[in-house]
């Protein structure tokens, strides 16, 4: 491990707003903060917004800055990535943001039923191979996990450079008759940006510089339905 990464791991270990449980400790078990994020972590009753695969945390930090009356939690498995967002938010004195280092597969071990108001999925791996379909963060498998932690009809946002993942997610929402709030294949070309959608991650800026179009879709997730999976396209 390089000295820079080692330093980040050491520093992230002392950030009070970063939760780093043992990776295997909460597979099938509940974390002490489950159901208590408002009371014990944020110490307020404001809505909770979660960013999955937050990377360097740019989106979580941007949202926390723009919306002081909401709480934000960035989740990623890579501690060296989370360090950037944790450091930035600490230096900015933000009190409405935290970071959780864990796998998204075990998210139900960390949040209780109806504890989360919104979920952001920003530039995830599209998992385009057919055999990896269940790994897509907007698959029916993962949405079923989100149903257990979201308030009924809570919002799910997907921002991606992958037209494949965007189309797949759109087909899933239509198949399950979910209420789509916003939907565009070219976020910046269609001038849809606002103070939320104009926040850009490190990877998003790279895609924009390369001329890629940014896709965006948001929808309400009905927590009372059994989700159906759209037909899985053949590998390209």
Image (cartoon, grey):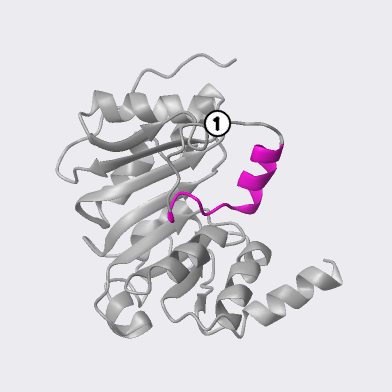
How far across and down, in percent of the image, does residue 45 sit?
A: 24, 77
Front one among 56 and 12: 56
- The residue sitting at 51% across, 58% down in the picture is 59
Location of residue 78 with respect to 222 vertically, above or below: below
- Report which residue position mark 1 lands on: 162
In the image, is 8 to the left or to the right of 164? right
In the image, is 135 to the left or to the right of 68? right
- The residue sitting at 65% across, 52% down in the picture is 202
How far across and down, in percent of the image, does residue 7 sit?
A: 77, 77
How far across and down, in percent of the image, does residue 157 sit?
A: 38, 45
**Quarter where residue 144 is shown:** top left
Task: Tell me where the magenta segment starts and ends, as one range.
Answer: 195-209
Front one among 175 and 213: 213
* Residue extending furthest toward the right: 3
Front one among 50 and 113: 50
**Residue 73 shows up from this direction:** yes
- The residue sitting at 43% across, 67% down in the picture is 66
The question of residue 201 being in magenta is answered with yes
């Amino acid at each position: 491990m390089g000295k820079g990464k080692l330093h980040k791991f050491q520093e992230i270990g002392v950030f009070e707003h970063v939760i780093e449980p043992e990776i295997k400790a909460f597979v099938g078990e509940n974390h002490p903060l489950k159901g208590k994020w408002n009371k014990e972590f944020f110490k307020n009753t404001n809505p909770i917004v979660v960013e999955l695969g937050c990377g360097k945390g740019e989106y979580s930090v941007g949202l926390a800055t723009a919306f002081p009356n909401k709480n934000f939690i960035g989740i990623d498995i890579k501690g060296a990535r989370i360090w950037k967002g944790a450091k930035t938010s600490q230096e900015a004195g933000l009190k409405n943001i935290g970071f959780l280092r864990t796998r998204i597969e075990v998210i139900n071990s960390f949040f209780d039923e109806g504890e989360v108001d919104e979920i952001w999925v920003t530039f995830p791996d599209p998992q385009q191979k057919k055999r990896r379909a269940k790994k897509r963060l907007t698959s029916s498998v993962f949405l079923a996990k989100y149903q257990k932690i979201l308030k009924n009809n809570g919002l799910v946002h997907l921002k991606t450079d992958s037209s494949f993942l965007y189309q797949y997610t759109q087909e899933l929402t239509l198949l399950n008759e979910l209420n789509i709030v916003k939907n565009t294949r070219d976020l910046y070309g269609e001038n849809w940006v606002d103070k939320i959608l104009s926040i850009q991650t490190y990877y998003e800026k790279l895609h924009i510089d390369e001329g890629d179009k940014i896709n965006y879709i948001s929808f309400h997730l009905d927590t009372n339905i059994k989700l159906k999976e759209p037909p899985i396209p053949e590998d390209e």
